[in-house]
């Protein structure tokens, strides 16, 4: 009885693992892109508000 559902359960876990892994890779590569964007902005002279002298 349990062997009837083994392929379905295995496929469900495999699809879920691929989806979670894909989302993880997407977040990783998107973060790299945003860091590169921030580095380009800072190199062009744009600074973060939190880096200003004088506080709030």
Image (cartoon, rainbow, N blue to C red):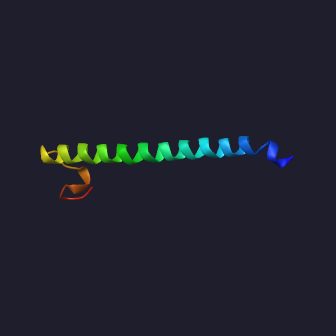
For the C terminus, the image quarter is bottom left
As rendered, which of 33 and 53 lies closer to the eye? 33
**Is 54 rendered above or below residue 13?**
below
Q: In which quarter of the image is residue 54?
A: bottom left
Residue at horizontal 24 percent and vertical 58 percent from the top: 55
As rendered, which of 36 and 46 lies closer to the eye? 36
Image position, residue 41 (x, y; %):
19, 43
Image position, residue 36 (x, y; %):
24, 45
Residue at horizontal 68 percent and vertical 46 percent from the top: 10
Quick one: which residue is furthest to the right in this view? 1
Residue at horizontal 54 percent and vertical 42 percent from the top: 19
Q: In which quarter of the image is residue 11?
A: top right
As rendered, which of 15 and 1 lies closer to the eye? 1
Image position, residue 8 (x, y; %):
72, 40
Residue at horizontal 36 percent and vertical 45 percent from the top: 29
Quick one: which residue is furthest to the front in this view? 3
As rendered, which of 21 and 11 lies closer to the eye? 11
Image position, residue 22 (x, y; %):
48, 42
Tell me: 1 left or right of 56. Answer: right
Tell me: 17 left or right of 27. Answer: right
Tell me: 1 left or right of 15. Answer: right
Q: What is the count of numbered marks? A: 0
């Amino acid at each position: 009885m349990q062997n009837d559902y083994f392929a379905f359960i295995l496929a469900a876990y495999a699809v879920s693992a691929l989806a979670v892994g894909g989302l993880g890779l997407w977040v990783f590569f998107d973060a790299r892109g945003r860091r590169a964007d921030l580095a380009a902005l800072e190199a062009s002279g744009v600074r973060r508000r939190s880096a200003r002298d004088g506080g709030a």
